[in-house]
Image (spheres, helix red, strand yellow):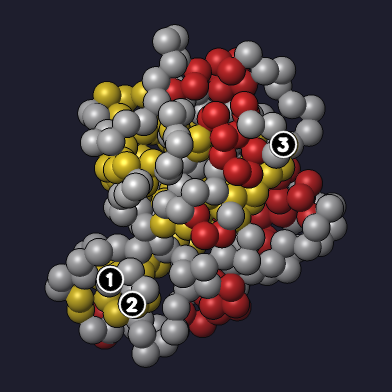
Amino acid sequence: MKLLRFGPKGQEKPGILDADGHVRDLSDHVTDFAGATVSLEALDTLRSVDVAALPLVSEPGRIGSCLAAVPNFFCIGLNYAKHAEETGAEPPKEPILFSKATSALSGPFDPVIIPRGSVKGDWEVELGVVIGRTALYVSEDDALDYVAGYCTINDVSEREFQIEKGGQWMKGKSAPTFGPTGPYLVTADEVPDPQNLRVTLTLNGETVQDSNTDDMIFTVREIVSYMSQFMELQPGDIIATGTPSGVGMGMKPQRFLKPGDVMEVEVEGLGRQRQVAEAAEI
């Protein structure tokens, strides 16, 4: 299934794509997509719905984040070999874990707002993993059984905030609109191999990131299992699994976002995003 949310910000409705790629309204079957409503059990219930009989949404308008809210917005740092190389960092021996503020969650076509004081805004196409049931002390062999689905994420970052102001990375990752997610939550049964997906990002029409999840240092299986050794993952948690090479920080000379820049972000089979960068209002 390809699940989505459509409508004005704060008034989104749950929907699903039918066999012809049209949006159908799921409001009579689920209130929204977040937490328990994206658990594996809840998704199994939705599979019994006759999609062709659902109300057709001829003009869905704005597409929101595929999740209304997330209990946790986790991220993995330096998880592509070529990205670690471009930043001059040693490939990590264990996954680097950090978080984005959940308030960074944003629609896939909403503007990205460059925050006040920002001089080093950057882009990061990532494969997103949505947890489908409580995971604690999970083995690698079983880890994918805890995944509800996958989505496209742009892990927008402010490198000065992240690196030059000390402390943890979170403050460079968490500004409002820094987490465009979607357009679809694609259920795990439609993604047979999360380690073989093309990931791309264009900036103003120029391809700057073009890689494959097979370059990930730690696989989705390894990430979910590893994280579950330290914390209890919950249904609706999202994990951004790292970005490939081609970020602005790694360019020579470095290149950062400015108002009017257009990012188009895609993970193979999970849908394409488009954001225009805008300056924060003073």
Percent from the top left, x then y, of residue 11? Answer: 33, 77
Q: Quadrant of the N terminus?
A: bottom left
Query: Residue most toward the front?
Result: 282
- Residue nearer the viewer, 116 or 192: 116
Percent from the top left, x then y, of residue 145? Answer: 67, 60
Q: Residue at position x 47%, y 73% from top?
A: 33
Circle on res. 16: none
Cα separation, mark 1 vs mark 3, equals 36 Å
Cα separation, mark 3 vs mark 2, equals 36 Å
Q: Can residue 69 be seen here?
A: yes
Q: Which residue is mark 1?
A: 8
Q: Which residue is mark 3?
A: 167
Q: Earlier in the sequence, mark 1 or mark 3?
A: 1
Percent from the top left, x then y, of residue 99? Answer: 65, 49
Q: At label 1, which amino acid type do we have? A: Pro
Q: At label 3, which amino acid type do we have? A: Gly
- Residue nearer the viewer, 101 or 94: 101
Q: Can residue 181 be seen here?
A: no
Relative to residue 181, is residue 25 depicted above or below? Answer: below
